Image (cartoon, rainbow, N blue to C red):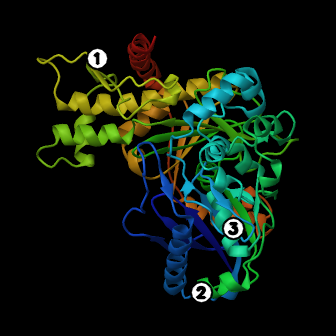
Amino acid sequence: MYLLGYDIGSSSVKASLINAETGKCVASAFYPKTEAEIMAVRSGWAEQNPDSWWEYLKLATAAVMDESKADPADIRSIGISYQMHGLVCVDKNKQVLRPSIIWCDSRAVEIGQKAFNDLGENYCLAHLLNSPGNFTASKLAWVKQNEPEVFDRIYKIMLPGDYIAMRLSGEICTTVSGLSEGMFWDFQQNALANELLDYYGIDASLIADIKPTFGLQGEVSNAAAAELGLKAGIPITYRAGDQPNNALSLNVFNPGEIASTAGTSGVVYGVNGQINYDPKSRVNTFAHVNHTTDNPRLGVLLCINGTGILNSWIRKMVGADGLSYAAMNELASQVAIGSEGVCILPFGNGSERMLENKETGCSLLNVNFNRHDRRHLIRAAQEGIVFSFKYGIDIMEGMGIPVKKIHAGHANMFLSPIFRDTLAGVTGATIELYDTDGAAGAARGGGLGAGIYQNTEEAFSNLERIAVIEPDTSKAEQYQAAYENWKQELEHRIQ
């Protein structure tokens, strides 16, 4: 018995086939092998052809089925993870009307800011839990204002995962979690955000039917089965945006649990058990995969642009001898906590929402040419990245999220002992590292939605935990002192 998961990213589409009994991934594949094309007709724009996602999905499915030699009749469910905040518009014949405006497209920023000002910060934050910002609703408003002939032909709008589910099943539907990420959901009314829709002049009929995040969302059609080499009738039983799904993949469902990634940019995704928001809108809040009216579960998303990219930059600057990341970690370990006063603010990759959209640039501070060398720079870079995470976690804790445990994949910055130990030490949280990815998580989510697993405990009982890092309480004061020094430098520059 198998579970099939898809992860529809902006770089590639990945498929994973999971053995439902053992939880082991029996095959996985992704396409394209080079990064997928992102069309940028103008500066700040980013679009993709939704049909290309389907073509990549077909290739990934074929590769997985060939590698696993699995019988398609043994696949019991399909789960879908997808790049968040994208806009797909289709007509009555379910044909795409224009390229998808994807998550990193910034054309609707001013539209969202005007809505925030006109509707009022109190309304937007209390009802939407965010500024309308550059999210899907604002992207749709841009289409209405700038491409009225396209807007008039729209039958339904979808997120990228909704589009893939439509191609699989022929049915157009979405979820509350998806609607919340697009700013289409009013958490006070527990209904569509009609006030924002009315403000933008968007008829509610354009919104797809709402289905549960876990549960039957359609079945693979005869036509899709023929294209994919699957069996018709396989139920589609789960879908979620990539960050909520990453949290699910790491078994993060409850208040106080955190899912984190630290690649080029970094994400801290915490679960809140109460409907709340940051009054400065420095983080985004969406319905988590297990959110219900009676049992609120909100995903609070902090994105930091300058994380692994700083570590990579430092390597280029100080590693003329072909320095490996492992060798960098060894050099950094020779320097005490706090890097002997050297401080790096890692914000050199664009404006940071956490800093109220300020673009401060990266700062390298307190270097003494007679005392410090590349060891101090390497350690200060990793500490600066960790301290930016801590700064964001402080915001989350101010919203009522008690951060006790951080779940992460065993990848990127989490491969560094200094990074892990510093993060555990300065937050006081236990870090658990797992062997999983988004497509595998989506497959498990599909198993939950299909009733193959009775609960999350059963679904993740065999998730492979690679390591547990406990905070070293004997060094807590040293970590805290280093963080306070870093924080003081930061706040001096953003005031």
N-terminal of the two: label 2 or label 3? Answer: 2
Give the spatial CA distance, label 2 vs label 3.
Answer: 22 Å
Q: Where residue 361 sits: x, y (%)? A: 34, 26
**Mark 2, mark 1: which one is toward the viewer?**
2
Query: Between residues 195 and 188, which one lies in front from this camera angle?
Result: 195
Residue at the extreme front: 149
Q: In this figure, which residue is indicated by the disc labeled 1?
A: 341
Q: Which mark is residue 376?
A: none
Q: Where residue 9 sits: x, y (%)? A: 52, 59
Q: Where residue 445 sits: x, y (%)? A: 69, 62
Tag 3 secondary structure: helix
Q: Is residue 475 above or below residue 39?
A: above
**Mark 2, mark 3: which one is toward the viewer?**
3
The image quadrant of residue 457 is bottom right
Amino acid type, callout 2: Ala
**Mark 3, mark 1: which one is toward the viewer?**
3
Q: Is residue 285 left or right of residue 171?
A: left
Q: Residue at x 43, y 42 (%)?
A: 265
Q: Are marks 3 and 1 in contact (CB under 8 Å)?
A: no
Number of numbered tags placed on the structure image? 3
Q: Is residue 353 above or below residue 292?
A: above
Give the spatial CA distance, label 3 vs label 1.
Answer: 53 Å
N-terminal of the two: label 3 or label 1? Answer: 3
Q: Which mark is residue 165?
A: 3
> Does residue 207 appear anywhere in the picture?
no
Q: In this figure, which residue is indicated by the disc labeled 2?
A: 70
